[in-house]
């Protein structure tokens, strides 16, 4: 099954870029936006698997609002 969520990116004071998904557990980071987005694919897979295994409902993806979209096949 394919899951698609917009990622929120925040640039930290040290230049790292944090990526997370509204409504899903966890966060990741990279030294660049591209690296943070690449790591976000793994984060999306892990977060969805955690929720499914625990029986918790998966939240609906929020509006894109210009954010990058991450897709993961699980």
Image: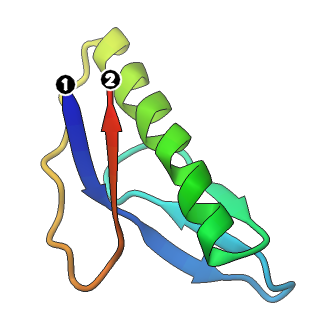
Residue pointed to by mark 1 = 1
- Near mark 1 (Cα within 10 A), the count class, few <14, some 14-19 or many ≥20, is few
Which circle marks residue 74 in the picture?
2
The answer for how far apart the CA atoms under marks 1 and 2 are is 5 Å
Count of number-bearing discs? 2
- Picture coordinates of residue 8, whole percent (x, y): 43, 71
Q: Within 10 Å of the Cα at label 2, are there few (<14), some (14-19), or many (20+) other Cα atoms?
A: few
Query: Does residue 63 sit above or below 59 in this rendering?
Result: below
**Pointer 1 with pointer 2, Cβ within 8 A:** yes
In front of the other: 57 or 45 = 45
Q: Of the residues under marks 1 and 2, which one precedes in the sequence?
A: 1
Mark 1: which secondary structure? loop
Which of the 4 image quarters holds residue 57? Answer: top left
- How is the rendered protein coloured? rainbow
Quarter containing the C terminus: top left
What residue do we see at 54% from left, 45% from top? 26
Task: State which quarter of the image contains the N terminus.
Answer: top left
Quarter location, residue 62: bottom left
In the depicted structure, whether residue 62 falls above or below residue 71: below
- Residue drawn at point x = 20 percent, y = 74 percent: 64
| Residue 55 in which image quadrant | top left
- Where residue 15 sits: x, y (%)? 80, 85
Secondary element type, mark 2:
loop
Where is residue 59 shown, x and y percent of the image? Answer: 18, 43
């Amino acid at each position: 099954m394919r899951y698609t969520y917009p990622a929120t990116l925040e640039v930290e004071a040290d230049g790292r870029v944090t990526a997370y998904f509204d409504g899903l557990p966890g966060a990741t980071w990279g030294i660049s936006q591209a690296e943070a987005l690449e790591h976000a694919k793994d984060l999306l897979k892990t977060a969805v698997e955690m929720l499914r295994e625990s029986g918790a409902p998966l939240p609906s993806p929020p509006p894109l609002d210009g954010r990058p979209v991450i897709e993961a096949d699980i």
